[in-house]
Amino acid sequence: MTDSSVFYRSRKPYPTAVRGEGVYLFDAGGRRYLDGSSGALVANIGHGRVEVAEALARQARELPFVHGSQFTSPVLEEYAARLMGFLGLPGFRFWAVSGGSEANESAIKLARQYHVERGEPGRYKVITRVPSYHGASLGALAASGMGARRAIYSPLINEAAWPKMPKPDPSLPGEEDAERLRGVLEEAGPSSVAAFIAEPVVGASDAALTPNAGYHKRIAEICREYGVLFIADEVMSGMGRCGAPLAVRLGGDVTPDLVVLGKGLAAGYAPLAGLAASARVYDTVMNGSGGFKHGFTYAGHPVSVAAGLAVLDVVEREGLTERARVQGERLLAGLRELREKYPVVLEARGQGLLLGLVLGDPTTGAAFGTPGVADRVAKAALSRGLITYPGTGAVDGTRGDHLLLGPPLTITDAELGEMLAALDGALEAATREQVGTA
């Protein structure tokens, strides 16, 4: 689009989306696409929900904006209470922002201030995992273990502040896997560590990688032992997508100190994300210097919060958390059939409707270098009317191809069949040619 004034993310051609309905998007030429990744795992309740649009319009007419340093609002108070109830986080406080990067930035800064208020200003490091992805803003990117997105900005990052832990190893029992955190803590110097942050089910950096049961419970215990806050990044995995309100609780009863939320909160109808802070963290900060030394102009934006409230109504009324579990099991079974059919698919995995295909060399089981097989599969799927979310670099920042899948939680059996048929054709077309060497 040479005559456009838009700053695009890349030089590829972009179709113009003009309408959404259910699990489908339609472009200006009338072509229909099944949104097999909900955009970027965002459109949890599907497209074109009139009740959500009406809720936004009502709020915009009544109270479109107040600044969070000066006012609260009825819609924010109601939403925070409803949301904490849905998530099973009694006593937690909700901090509303506009996107997952802002929410993770907020969590990192809150963890730092918490320790300062406690009289431990030497705690500033945040342990993260490799690979991981926590956002595009500089602090959230520094916390991320995703080489390709991070490399160009590394001169702006104090690497010593971000110790890295290996990703979950599904071959290990959950408790044993989690114990590796202890070694990272000891090496970093426990008295210098403020927090540990992790995605309960990994998203864009290593499609739907999930630790074994007991992992998160042991992580929480180790964090408490060392006085470190446990931050669960549920931006992608939360709000029912994985078949539970919070994915961190899939393998046991766990309550992190901070829970970061996004994407499915407003399901794409408005920019909304946030963090839930335990009473201990909230009270420590408020009883210290009297407030959180942080803020965004659009934090707690009434119209965005109204979208979140309307989306939560849909999720609860239609039982979409349980639906994600049931439909996820069906989709995963179909993906495992494709794995048997196409040797390039090394693994099909995930929880609920956050699923992934790991692609690699069928002769060695090793990850590819950079042949772009995930991108080829995604392009072949798109030509068949299916949107997916390809990725690379899960092994070492360069090697590793995967496809992330996460349709709206409303997807029907027939639509699942359509999605699997398109994937089948895409894998056949993309693997017909030489896919490269390991």
Image: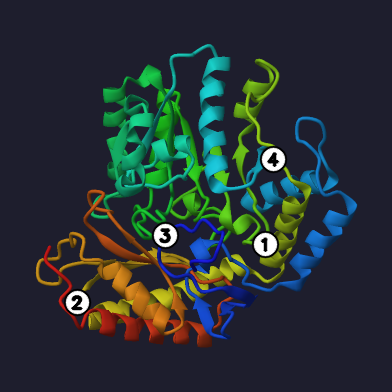
| 188 to the left or right of 24 | left
Label 3, secondary structure: give it: loop
Contact check, label 4 and label 1, Cβ < 8 Å: no
Task: Identify the mark at residue 10; answer none if there is no mark.
Answer: 3
Q: What separation in Å lies between label 3 and label 1 (alpha carbons)? A: 24 Å
Image coloring type: rainbow
Residue 322 visible, this angle? yes
Q: Are marks 1 and 2 in contact (CB under 8 Å)?
A: no
Q: Nearer the viewer, residue 150 or 408?
A: 150
Q: CA–CA distance between discs 3 and 2?
A: 31 Å
Cα separation between marks 4 and 1: 16 Å
Residue type, mark 2 in image: Pro
Q: Earlier in the sequence, mark 2 or mark 4?
A: 4
The residue where tag 4 is placed is: 299
Residue of label 2: 343
Residue denoted by label 1:
269
In front: label 1 or label 2: 1
The answer to which quarter of the image holds residue 345 is bottom left
Q: Amino acid at mark 3?
A: Ser
- Residue 347 visible at all: no
Where residue 26 appears, as percent x and y from the top left, is: 58, 80
Q: CA distance from mark 1 to mark 2?
A: 39 Å
Q: Position of residue 213 (x, y in %)?
A: 38, 52
**Residue 118 vertical position relative to residue 302 in the rendered view, above or below:** above
Between disc 3 and disc 1, the foreground one is 3
Q: Residue at x 76, y 72 (%)?
A: 50
Are there few (<14), some (14-19), or many (20+) residues within 10 Å of tag 4?
Answer: many
Quick one: quadrant of the C terminus?
bottom left
